[in-house]
């Protein structure tokens, strides 16, 4: 295919699905390339197709399938696991990159979390840089605990003491994220950062705030369990 596309990651997650259907409904001429994991080509295609079939049928489904292509990819591998020709072709057609693939599991070992959340983001920045296109990043802001009522993000500024064994890991992850932001600025990608809010706890309501170029987007109700966006 040679048509221009917006490249989307994380399309099989609960927020990614919303994004795909929103783009299809509000931008009728836009074509999408969904980067989807899979043990083989058939599984990746099936996972991507299910995103469309989850809500569409008949002619609406057929029309969406004509506008959406599924690309088997792995954000943990160089060039997203694509062969050089496919990668170059994708970069040559991309008019924008929306990166939402991530693991939001709290139980992953640090290196596994970094592999997708930090290194994967760096590889998507590589693609946007090669395409010389816009880059939109979907991050996450959590409010968790056993309290009730309104929980403000600003309260996190008065954070409790962090156990010593976690401080080094937090520092490394924070520096990795800062490096990614500096690199985006250096490459003049002018990234947009969109944060989804997940609230956990009894009757907890998350109150959003925005900083810098980030934009908060509600994507889950209070108490909804977190899951991988990939």
Image (cartoon, rainbow, N blue to C red):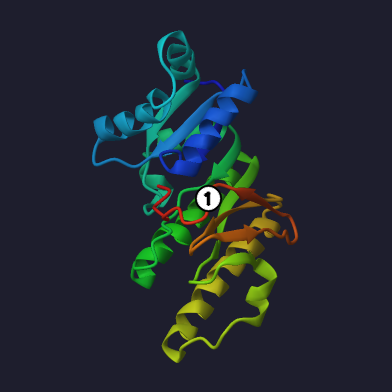
**Viewed as shown, does residue 54 lie left or right of 185?**
left
Q: Nearer the viewer, residue 96 or 86?
A: 96
Q: Is residue 5 visible?
A: no
Q: Nearer the viewer, residue 24 or 18?
A: 18
Tell me the residue at 39%/67% (across/down). Answer: 106
Tell me the residue at 42%/33% (across/down). Answer: 86
Find residue 76 and report its image quarter.
bottom left
**Viewed as shown, does residue 155 lie left or right of 55?**
right
Find residue 181 and report its image quarter.
bottom right
In the displayed structure, 31 sits above or below 181; it is above
Residue farthest to the bottom? 164
Tell me the residue at 75%/60% (across/down). Answer: 212
Q: Is residue 151 visible?
A: yes
Tell me the residue at 24%/42% (across/down). Answer: 39
In the displayed structure, 84 sits above or below 142; it is above
Q: Position of residue 3 (x, y in %)?
A: 55, 21
Q: Position of residue 225 (x, y in %)?
A: 41, 55
Q: Position of residue 1 (x, y in %)?
A: 46, 20
Q: Secondary structure at mark 1?
A: loop
In the displayed structure, 31 sits above or below 219; it is above
> How many numbered marks does the figure carry?
1
Q: Position of residue 196 (x, y in %)?
A: 58, 52
Residue farthest to the top? 59
Q: Identify the residue position indicated by label 1 in the image.
A: 221
Q: Dot 1: few (<14), some (14–19), or many (≥20) neighbours within 10 Å?
A: some
């Amino acid at each position: 295919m040679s048509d221009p596309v917006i490249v989307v990651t994380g399309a099989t997650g609960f927020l990614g699905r919303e994004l795909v259907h929103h783009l299809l409904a509000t931008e009728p001429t836009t074509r999408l390339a969904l980067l989807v994991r899979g043990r083989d080509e058939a599984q990746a295609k099936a996972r991507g197709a299910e995103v469309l079939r989850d809500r569409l049928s008949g002619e609406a489904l057929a029309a969406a399938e004509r506008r959406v292509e599924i690309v088997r990819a792995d954000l943990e591998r160089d060039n997203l696991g694509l062969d050089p020709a496919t990668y170059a072709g994708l970069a040559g057609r991309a008019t924008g990159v929306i990166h939402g693939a991530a693991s939001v599991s709290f139980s992953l070992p640090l290196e596994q979390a970094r592999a997708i959340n930090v290194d994967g983001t760096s590889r998507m920045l590589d693609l946007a840089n090669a395409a010389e296109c816009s880059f939109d990043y979907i991050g996450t802001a959590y409010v968790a605990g056993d309290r009730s009522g309104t929980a403000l993000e600003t309260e996190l500024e008065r954070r409790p003491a962090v156990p010593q064994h976690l401080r080094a890991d937090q520092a490394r992850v924070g520096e990795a994220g800062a490096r990614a932001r500096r690199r985006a600025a250096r490459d003049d990608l002018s990234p947009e950062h969109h944060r989804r809010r997940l609230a956990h706890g009894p009757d907890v309501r998350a109150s959003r705030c925005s900083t810098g170029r980030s934009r908060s987007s509600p994507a889950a109700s209070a108490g909804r369990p977190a899951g991988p966006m990939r």
